[in-house]
Amino acid sequence: MIEMYSSEIRIRPVIEDDLDSVNRVIEAAVMTWVLPQRVKRLSLPVYRYSRQDLAHLGMVLAEDQRRHIVGVAAWEEADAKDAPAGCRSLLLHGIYVEPSRHRQGIGRQLFGAAEAAVCQLQYDGLLVKAQQDAIGFFESLGMRSLAVEEPLHQYAYRLWKASACPGFEDDF
């Protein structure tokens, strides 16, 4: 079970009672993306999590000292065709942070929880299919862009980071 603390933020697993607050954070975060308003509004239902998602995804949240949920991250095993050849990978569905809490290290802490899951579950690395305006954030965390071999079948912005667990090296 992943549970981490900093001086102000606690990272813990999501439980069913958290879902409404988690989805409010996701909605607020999605609405800041550099996309047309209509696209954000129409795509938002796809980003919301349900009770069923808790059974299939690894999910953690960030809460402040008052126990307000200020961020969330979710992941699952990546499809082999999306990861670098021969690698088992966790697919990071996303990191969502309450817009008023951007640039306070919360996203980095959530990313750290995903990296811890990579080690705990013994995956080779972490993969994310990012929004274009999030590429800089993920690169600042050591992720590198993967080439798109089949543009019609691949997500345009795939980034990869090899496991930081002892015994793993990044050859990609």
Image (cartoon, rainbow, N blue to C red):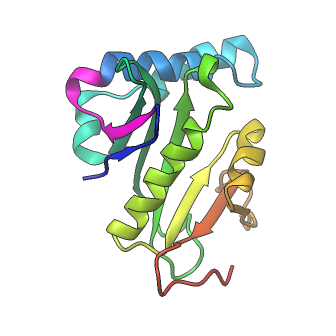
**Does the stretch in magenta take in 11?**
yes
Magenta region, residue range? 9-18
- Residue at the outermost bottom position: 167
Please say if 148 is above or below 129. Answer: below
Q: Quadrant of residue 143?
A: bottom right
In the rendered image, the vertical position of residue 168 relative to residue 161, given as above or below: below
Q: Position of residue 1 (x, y in %)?
A: 24, 53
State the residue lying farthest toward the front. Answer: 7
Position of 122 with respect to 131 (left or right) is: left
The quadrant in which residue 127 appears is bottom right
The residue under the point 56% across, 64% down is 82
Question: Residue 30 at what x, y percent from top left?
Answer: 60, 23
Quarter of the image with the C terminus is bottom right
User: What residue sits 22% from the left and 43% below the top?
Assistant: 55
> How far across and how far down the image is residue 71, in percent?
48, 29
The answer to which of 31 and 66 lies nearer the viewer is 66
